[in-house]
Amino acid sequence: MKKMNLLMFTICCISLSYSVDAQKKENFKFTKLVYHASRCNGSCPQISLIIKRNRKIIVRREMFKTKSQVDERYSGQFKGRLSPALFNEIILQLKAAQLDSLKFPDVDCCDGSIKTLIVYYNGKRRQFKSMAPPETVQQLFETLSSIAIDTKLKRAAVTKGIEE
């Protein structure tokens, strides 16, 4: 009987733990995301992207034909709006990254692109920056980069800088 009670107590505790974790993830209140990818020692694009909670985006990018030649057709400031499906995918990727405990290694040397992620959520602002971000955000960064280099975005008048 004692073993049965102990087993039931353990099951209840585990269930409660999963419920609290699920509730924390469900209470994710996204406000804004800022993403930067610096230029590398090559032809990597330089990207600045803002995603707002209303799904509107602003992109400032410098694209390159070669290591030293800017591609003016695809460089400049652009705007658009994410589809609900893509926006939800980003939110899921942010939740999966566990922003409250996420840490980036302090790597900013060498010739690669430095990635910066600034996320406003649940009344907080978290900023992460590294040339070697953790594996947990690689899919998110691939998604953000593909949004930023989308050639179907509409050119926009340059208004103000994008938060660093």
Image (cartoon, rainbow, N blue to C red):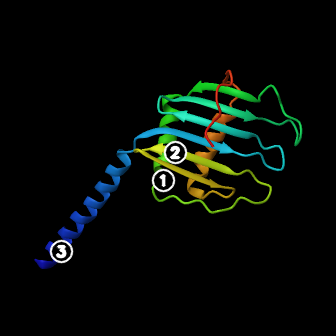
Marks 3, 1: nearer the viewer: 1
Q: Percent from the top left, x then y, of residue 26?
A: 35, 45
Write down the residue under mark 3.
6
Helix, strand or loop status at disc 3: helix
Quarter residue 61 falls in: top right
Comes first in the chain, label 3 or label 1: 3
Write down the residue under mark 1.
99
Q: Is residue 134 above or below residue 118?
A: below
Q: Percent from the top left, x then y, of residue 149?
A: 70, 34
Q: Percent from the top left, x then y, of residue 136?
A: 56, 56
Marks 2, 3: nearer the viewer: 2
Write down the residue under mark 2.
119
1, 28: nearer the viewer: 28
At horizontal 80% and vertical 55% (from top left) the residue drawn is 111
Marks 2, 1: nearer the viewer: 2
Comes first in the chain, label 2 or label 3: 3
Distance from label 2 to label 1 (Cα)? 8 Å
Image-based side of 83 in relation to 43, left or right? left
Amino acid identity at mark 1: Leu
Helix, strand or loop status at disc 2: strand
Image-based side of 133 in relation to 103, left or right? right
Distance from label 3 to label 1 (Cα)? 35 Å
Image-based side of 83 in relation to 142, left or right? left
At horizontal 78% and vertical 35% (from top left) the residue drawn is 63
Distance from label 2 to label 3 (Cα)? 42 Å
Q: Percent from the top left, x then y, of residue 125?
A: 48, 47
| Direction front: furthest residue | 160
Cβ atoms under marks 2 and 1 closer than 8 Å: yes
Cβ atoms under marks 2 and 3 closer than 8 Å: no
